[in-house]
Image: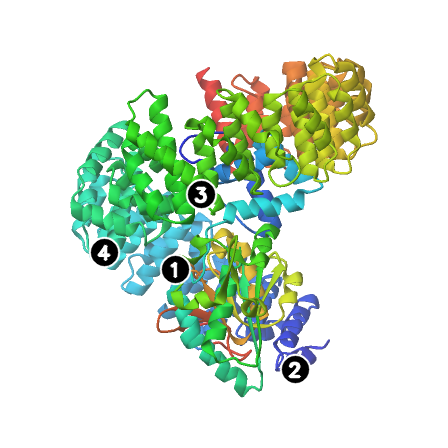
Amino acid sequence: MTIESVRHALREADPERRRQAVILLGEESHEGALPLLSEALGDADWRVRKEAVRVVTELPNTREVTRALVDGVVQGDNVGKRNSALEALVKLGTAVAPILLEELPSIPASARKFLLGVLGEIPDDFVLPVLVEACEDADPNLVAAAIDALARHGGTQAESALRRRLSSPDPYQRMAALDGLSHLGAFVAWEELEPLLSDRLVRRVALSTLGGTGRPEAVAPLTEALTDRSSHVVGAAAVSLIQLLSTSESLRVLVTDQAHALSPASRDALRALLHQGDAQARVSAAHLLLLAQDEPSLQGVVGLAVNDVLSPGALEALRTWGLKAARPLLSLFRTTEGQERAMSLELAADLTADARARQQTVDRSLEADLRRALLEGLSDLETSVALAAARSLVNWVEPEDAPTLVRVARRGHEALGRACAETLIALCAIAPDVVRVAIENVAFEGEGGAALASVAARLGGPRVSERLHAAMSADDPGMRRAALEALSEMREHGSAELIGYALADEHIDVQAAAARALGALSDSDERELATNALRLVLDSGTPAVQAAAVRALGEAGDEASIPSLRRLAASDAPEVVVAAIDALRRLADPDLATLLIRAIGHADEEVVKQALIALFETIGEEAVPHVVAALDHVAWDVRALAARLLGPSPTSAARDALVGRLARERNDLVRSVIAEVLGDAESA
Amino acid sequence: MPILFDRGPKLQLEEFRLIRDFINDFCGIFFADDALYVVERRLRERITALGLLSFAQYYQYLRYHPDAAAEVERAVDELTTNETYFFREEYQLRAFAEEILPELRSRLQQSGSRKLGIWSAGCSTGEEVYTLAILVLESGLFEDWDVRVLGSDISKRVLHKARRAIYGPSSFRTMPKRYERYFLETREGLQVHPRIRALSHFAHLNLLDRGRSAIVGKVDTIFCRNVLIYFDQASRRRVLENFHERLNPGGYLLLGHSESLLNATTAFELCHLTTDLVYRRSRTSGPIGRGNP
């Protein structure tokens, strides 16, 4: 396509044709392409502009391109063109930085501020002097842009420049500088923040930064700020208080004491915050209110708990509130719906059960009310409420509850069935005959039958066996699986053969469950039958079933299967290889090391990890060179494992490798593991 | 789910990141490290249900099991399930009924169209879909029009409930009484009236799957409320590009009250209604405006 035809295509009404023309400009090198791309950067359609950004950043001539892009920024009329040009400059990054620094002094101030923003995105430190100098410019817009750019750039020099702006006579600059430091996670000392607390414009940002000071002096102004008229200020104060609380034990005590003494106005403000503002403010408000043991806020707190928004710290505060919160929560159960109702009930029950476990005195009327509520909840139409009740009833279950639990188990919700079954199993310990009667005439087929099979297994007896045998032929694979698991648990003689049939079930999960169940029977008098059956599927099953059979043989200690397992360690299916390595390790295969060294080169990182663990266990320090090599594996989780395996006392070669890896490592988790290992090695 | 006292397998940070990244690759949903305890709580039930013993085993299940795709959908469902109910966020629905629907009717009629399409992206158990259908019917503006309200979700489980259209009391906690006539009593709860169900349709869709999302066709309004919060920035952009493509020019995008398109896309224009801010695809395929590229 000639440049003329591309020019023509860029004038077409259809944006897709214009976009295709831009693509062509990139694919074929055209003299005169740059002006056309410049034009396309300001196209009316965002997809054309986006394509132009991509193409222009792939062009070879950086100086000419940079100049064209700078021109795109300087022209003020077409905002789309300006933004596209800026986006392209950011993408070009370091390559254009020196040219931008050259051009900057001659660019009008109105455009210079945008280019400062571009410099802020470039990670190289040589851009910093220009940004720092721009902070002293007479034009406040340029100063603001420079501050913003420094905040995005980060680093020690940027932080110092931002700190100097904290004492600027311009309040907006003070605010921007503090915001920037906060954004960088830079430590700002109490002494730098205190003067800013009385600065109306900067106050909110100052309050939100106080949390990082770790100073007890910060608690009082933060507590005072909880009565501010602005919910944003209250939120900032709440977040900072919680941040301080987790700094040290003494601050935890101080903030907790302040929470206990919160004024009515503060409590009102925090309660309002539970329903508005950002997530962090709401969680912090909840935490403070729980520390304050504030009953009126419980419904709001429960609402956050339902959405899993409560932090571990807030939950700990609720645990500390303990039994005293149980009755208010029970009241909430009566006045709320759905998941809030379920959560209120479960929290009330958990706190009461915990109090009992700690041998605290629990009021009998509370226990009676709780039990009544649990039974009411059990019959609630809302599954979440019934589930909460079924789970919690385990601590208050009575023999007369058995028929209700069986009925609710059959409602057809899997988790509900399991919860009812667990409570019935608990009841078996005190009233087995009652449970036996309750499930006697209940068919295992149908809803909830699978859950009840596990209860039957706990009861045992010939009648139960017969019913479970029948259930092994159920239409529902979930029922078949539950039946064979129950039979395995009962360990009756003859069950291995029956369970063995299930290795040929039409459903994979039943087959895998059968393999696991046979493994569990390997320490019974049916060991030989069980292990023979498992060996049969090593070559004929699907990978998921093979893997289950392999693991079962390993757990069974079946040394006769070692040759087969060695063969499977070369399988195409990674899950089979992982299982085979694990099994051979358990069986202490004497030739394992050779196999493992091969497996370390496997394409699947789960295999590599399993092989590394097994190799280290098998040959100890001789494995170090292989583990060190794994520090350069492409998968971060392999690198993390390798670092961890090198342990608290790495050899000097290993230590050098760890140090070298740390210098190159970008994954924060791997870095953290390496630093921990090296730190442990130092202290050892 | 048990919340106060730890019961069951613990989720280590490495396992969390592996599972998180796996799910993110599948459907764009992303959880930061500080959500580890949420993921731990919500996925424990899945480990028990599958007969597994640890999160490490669960990760391997997601990677290798033949039923892994279904399990990932199930996991996403557990991780993103927040309660929904009829007439949720009423102020926004009021804006939809009182301002958006009349504008759509007027404009579509002028263009000669008598077809109205609405997409509830991430419809969960269906209450939003039926709510929107009720509002369209109640408006009286679209008699004899071809009205379709499509709900899509990545979870087959919630779609099953949506199709059954039977709901318990908590789904009606904020529903004004005057809409009760759109429900019929059954033994298991209230069922949506056939007239409303006739306007409502459901599809199993991953919002990141642009190709398959073409099944939606072109619509006039998209509701995607409290869904995008679960996506990482790159996935959010992809979903929004998809939405832009699915919307007719002048079509509306309504998000959750704490969501915005800031830092995600500038392809939509902001539209100030009386009680809400919504987004809109430009009415022409040309410039949205000099100030808002």
Residue at 74 percent across and 38 percent down: it is A507
* Residue holding disc 3: A385
In front: A285, or B242?
A285
Q: Does the residue at mark 3 contact the one at mark 4 (Cβ under 8 Å)?
A: no
- Kindly check if marks 1 and 3 are in contact, taking CB atoms under 8 A apart as contact: no
- From the top left corner, tell me how far across and down residue B71 is, in percent: 63, 43
Type of amino acid at the residue the image marks with label 4: Ser
Mark 3 to mark 4 CA distance (whole Å) = 37 Å
Front-lying residue, A413 or A376? A376
Q: Write down the residue under mark 1.
A: B174
Q: Nearer the viewer, mark 1 or mark 2?
A: 1
Name the side, left or right, on which A219 lies relative to A26.
left
Residue depth check, mark 2 versus mark 3: number of the one nearer the observer:
3
User: Amino acid type of disc 2?
Assistant: His
Please state which amino acid type lies under the numbered disc 3.
Val
Residue nearest the viewer, comparing B236 with A144:
B236
